[in-house]
Image (spheres, rainbow, N blue to C red):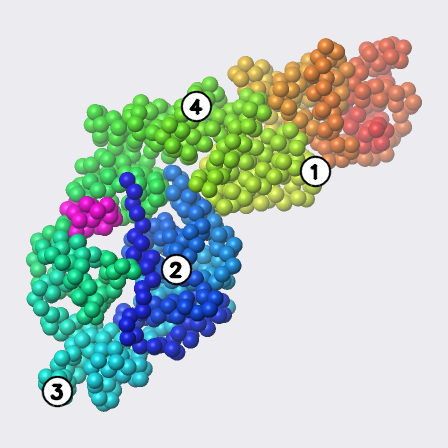
Amino acid sequence: MSIPLLSTKLFIPPPRPGLVARLRLLDKLNAGLRAGQRLILIAAPAGFGKTTLLSAWIDQITACASPPRAAWLQLDPGDDDRVRFMRYLIAALQTIDARWGQTAQAMLQAPLSADGDQALAAALAALINDLAAQPQQSVVVLDDYHLIQSRPVHDALTFLLDHVPPIIQFVVAGRADPPLPLARLRATGQLTEIRAVDLRFTPDESAIFLNETMQLDLTRDQIAALDQQAEGWIAGLHLAALALQGTLSRQGRRDFNAFLESFSGRNRYVLDYLIEEVLSRQADDVQDFLLRTSILDRLTGSVCEALTDRPHGETRLAALEQANLFIEPLDQDRTWYRYHPLFAEFLRSRLQQRLSVSTVLELHRRASGWYTQHGLWHEAIAHALRAQDYDHAAALIEQIARETWIMRGESGTLLAWISALPQAIVIARPRLRTIHAWALMADGQREAAAACAQQVIDTTPPDQTELIGEAEAISAIITALHSNVPRTIELAQRALEHLPASDHFLRGLVALQLGLAYDTAGNLSAAGRVYTEATVIGRTANLPFISLMAAIQLADLKVVQGQLHEAAAAYQHAGQLGAEPDQQLPIVSMAYSSLGRVWYEWNDLDRATQYLQESISWGQRWAANDIRSTGLIYLAYVQLAQGQTAAAYDLLQQADRALHQRIVSPLSVDVARMHQARLALRLNDLPVALAWAEDYQARLPELPATLRVSGAATLARIWLVQGQAAGVCELIGPRATTLEAGGLIGSALEFHMLHALALHQLDRPEEARTVFTRALTLAEPGGYVRLFVDEGEPMRFLILDCRLRIEKSSAQLHSYIDRLLTAFPAAQESAVQLQPSALSPQPLIEPLSDRELEVLRLIAEGYANQEIAQRLVVALSTVKTHINNIYGKLAVQSRTQAVARARTLGLLP
């Protein structure tokens, strides 16, 4: 079911025939346009000709040479929904250029945005980028802005005013000053203001209007008297002219004087009197037509016929326009009209006085029926609510809720409709309560949404499994956002049991949540199975968000399993599909971020930078700060690998700021903090790393399995720097084999590697070689490089040591080791060093002897003690004595530290 946008809201009203030329006001508007001021404000009470002036101005400026382009949005109370406002604003701008706002539209209707603020911010940023790229001056009119009461809408417009290029100018017209930064704009010369005192007719303008436009043929004194009473109020003069038409020719000056006496007092009372005068002069059937159709915000012939039980609705509307009875066309073909707001307010007031309550309710019921029949769902629901036909309104809401919420993101509209229903109606309809839960969740009210969904689960009859499943789906999504993995798995499994096979969207959405939960819990086989199901659902039902998200998660599993080449291909494919113009999905940033991480692991730093910057750009565009922070952190890894320490530190600060701006998932914050600790360690900022370690150990029982594993690897690195190698062996030694058996090859090889470093630090070289050879064997198929190189000189020594002992038959592993060795930088000043304070360049207390230098060079080449003894033809005990002397003179405690210290001092190449 499609809910169309109303093109009548985008129609620029043409100037009325016989319009009084407002040259002084047109000059003021043109001056603001030439000055490139960000905002032109027209604020005055009803009836001062705001819309008429703007209509004439747009007609004038678009008819000149090299005209600016113009867009118009006629606002109504429904535009208080921030997403609806943005969609109509984009539609208005697309009347200028159809390319504008395409990305922003995709962002607004991205399925199940867990953060409405995030979606709006992303859409605004994308829209501004589009506007910044256009070269021609454009004017955007927002008429009847006083109908907007929503703070988010005001904030959105303020953001646009602050960031659009000067070539885009907004014109806001309404009955009162909007809550925009007017003082700031005024102080900086960015505001043109036209107010009631400016809009009032001058005596000359009043004369032209009364005698030429309204053809009254009044004397100068009569015009002056009317103008004095009306004080230039255009609506008052217009109504007075309508009331006087035909009177003067019949009864002359005496009747004019009597009329003038009645034309005094407050505008509201004068207005009521004048409209009553005008209305009373119409035929009875015209009065009846006006009153009955006044309930409509927009009028077209057939809906008027439905309300009045009379034919020829189009003819009647055309006749009203011809008679100048405060009716305005809303399209070029004059199919749709609206009454002037002042006239409509008066007619509705008289309608309540002249017709019974039941008759008025019946009119609204008829209007709702007509709009329903013609697929105009918003108006159908609005009139059903005004008719107090709550069951019909509830049924319509249930019918279009998914379209409104999923495809248009208008959770505010849904919440407003539901709040207008009696509570008893909502409680009695489980479907409506489920919709209420969706809308609350999309609006960011997660606790209320969870409570609403739980009520549906608890009170819905067991045979209504579809509704129960949908409520369980909502609960699973909310629980996942709170990182409650066991509860998420339970709810998602139950939802999939209850949801029908035909509900592809919800089943795909729940499958994604379940897969993520399994993944987080470390159950890779279950996660892979569910992700595969979600991929099939997404492709079968043409749900690209579902299929692409599942594909990316499957690629993530490939990374966990150490299959980097397969993962990279999947990320690349997902990124290409998601970036197509008709998709523009935010998950593209996840694909690019992961692809950048893979290329970093392969030590292709240029490609890694390219994809990570693309990910950061997408994250910025979508205001997805968790994804953006991940890209910034991995870009810091790249900068550090290139020796750009200051740049890496700056990127870490940017990532930290991004995480503080808006948080989508606590898990994403924990992962970011862990990587920040790793980078801090490499930047020799040990206090930051230790603070993370303390928090990690305190929270260990509550952390998900994936974070417990990656956190253990980070903790091991910290302990190695602190010289706690025995603790590292105890922490990760046994777990490496367990991880390998469970298929978590990426983590297993990392644990083997760290275990080997710890064993080497403990001077247990044979064990270290055995463990490290296993790490290399697991890493070679995936082509891991940076995992080893980032560990610096101790790792280089370990690789050299193993290379000498790998059998010649293992040519593939030999080749891999050679690739790793060539990836190490020639100088190791920026490499990670164990106990950096002990390895700082200080002069030796006692120089090494020639024999000790020879032993040291053999240690650096990876020879074991026995091999050194054989090579030098000395006893093993002699070799050990030399090594102990080397340790003492270099102030180190292990072979690894000795080699690193010697390189720092220039004793080794």
Q: Give the label, 2 or 4, closer to the camera.
A: 2
Residue 252's label in the rendered image is 3
Distance (Cα) linking label 2 and label 4: 46 Å
Q: Sequence-wise, which precedes: disc 1 or disc 3?
A: 3
For the residues labelled 1 and 3, the Cα–Cα distance comes to 95 Å
Please give the name of the residue rendered at 38% of the width and 32% of the height, measured from the top-left corner: 542
Nearer the viewer's eye, disc 1 or disc 3?
Answer: 3
What secondary structure do most residues of the magenta stretch adopt?
A: helix
Residue 427 location in percent, x, y?
20, 38
- Inspect the image, locate mark 2, and give the three-letter code of the amino acid beneath it: Ala
Q: Secondary structure at mark 2?
A: strand
Q: Which residues fall within the magenta stretch?
A: 367-390
User: Which numbered marker is on residue 11?
Assistant: none
Q: Which residue is depicted at the point 32% across and 66% down?
A: 14
Amino acid identity at mark 4? Thr
Residue 71's disc is 2
The 10 Å Cα crowd at callout 4, few under 14, some 14 to 19, many 20 or more, is many
